[in-house]
Amino acid sequence: MDDYFLRSPRLGFRCWRDTDLALARETIVVRINTVGNLLDPTVTRYITSRGYTLREVQIRLELEIEAQHAHSIQYWPIFLLATDEHVGCCGLRVRDNQPEIPELGVHVVSRHWRQGYAVEAASCVIEYAFTVRGTQAMGFTEPTPIQLRTSLRGVTMHFLKQAYT
């Protein structure tokens, strides 16, 4: 794929498109539960217990596209460079209306877990944030820090403070 703006050794990052609803849906959901919400409990247990409706996934996609236009950041979809297979998303989003202190997030579809993609993607985005964007600090939200701290053992970051919003 030619439109990767960011690459790691195995992953390519590009911006979300209006036509990416199926990818957005795959990133946060895999099946429809009994109340019509979309969820993959192995992935969404860190995000929501009830899942997402298809309309909520569409809204999330629109918000990501809007964030890219407004702030040049989003949770970018990531793909394997070797096959262009979708792996999930990783990126930055505006936190507490402070674009200068973005929040890092990683969502890897469960079939790609335990292959080091979360660490590789997050490391790439962290480097991009600090070297290209000039970011001085980065945030995380609960429950992500526990999972990311486990996944990002090899990434050098320093804890500054815990803030509740």
Image (cartoon, rainbow, N blue to C red):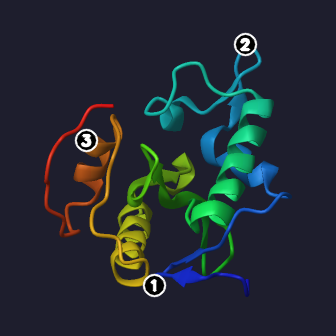
Q: Which residue is mark 1?
A: 9
Q: Secondary structure at mark 2?
A: loop
Reading the chain from its start, which is encountered first: label 3 or label 2? 2
Q: Which percent across, then down, holds residue 51?
A: 62, 25
Q: Which percent across, then down, holds residue 23?
A: 73, 54
Which residue type does callout 2 highlight?
Thr
Report the front residue among 131 and 142.
131
Which residue type does callout 1 highlight?
Pro
Report the front residue among 29 and 16.
16
Reading the chain from its start, which is encountered first: label 1 or label 3? 1
**Is the residue 93 above or below the residue 40 in the image?**
below
Residue furthest to the top in view is 35
Residue 99: name its quadrant: bottom left
Q: Which residue is mark 3?
A: 146
- Picture residue at 31% right of the left edge, 59% below the top: 138
- Picture residue at 72% right of the left edge, 13% below the top: 34
Contact, mark 3 vs mark 2 (Cβ under 8 Å): no
- Picture residue at 42% right of the left edge, 83% below the top: 132
Left or right of 111 on screen, residue 39: right
Left or right of 157 on screen, residue 38: right
Q: Which residue is mark 2?
A: 34
Residue furthest to the right in view is 19
Q: Which percent across, then down, holds residue 67?
A: 62, 56
